[in-house]
Image (cartoon, rainbow, N blue to C red):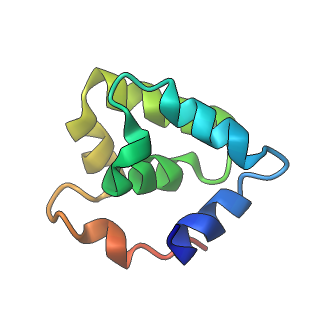
Amino acid sequence: MRSSLRHSMMKLQPYSKTNVVTTYRSSETKLLGLERFRFAALKLSRGRMDKLADAVRLANKDWRDLLVAAGFADSVDAHKDWKPV
């Protein structure tokens, strides 16, 4: 797991990594296997599980909207430059 993904998942405390993975697995778009989408959902979550669930719902509705909202739509590598704060 990339260090920036690990760092952003730590921001979701006190929620466990298991809850995050479960949220991703419940996604109809199967965000678990797609780094770009996982990062987009984590970015939109701003460290909150309820916002993560909202981002996953957005991806289920239209994954392109998730990428646009996160600012990752213009490049397949845009998520690689994201630095969680």
Front residue of 43/26: it is: 26
- Where residue 58 sits: x, y (%)? 38, 29
Q: Image point 26% across, 69% down: which residue?
A: 78
Q: Residue furthest left?
A: 74
- Where residue 60 sits: x, y (%)? 34, 24
Q: How many numbered circles are shown?
A: 0
Q: Image point 32% across, 41% down: which residue?
A: 66
Front residue of 66/19: it is: 19
- Where residue 25 sits: x, y (%)? 50, 31
Q: Residue furthest right?
A: 14
Side of 74 where 26 appears, left or right: right
Name the image quarter holding the C terminus: bottom right
Residue 32 shows in this picture: yes
The image quarter in which residue 75 lies: bottom left
Side of 70 where 11 appears, left or right: right
Q: Is residue 61 above or below residue 34?
A: above
Q: Image point 24% across, 28% down: which residue?
A: 62
- Where residue 53 sits: x, y (%)? 56, 30
Q: Image point 33% across, 49% down: which residue?
A: 34
Residue 54 shows in this picture: no
Side of 14 where 72 appears, left or right: left
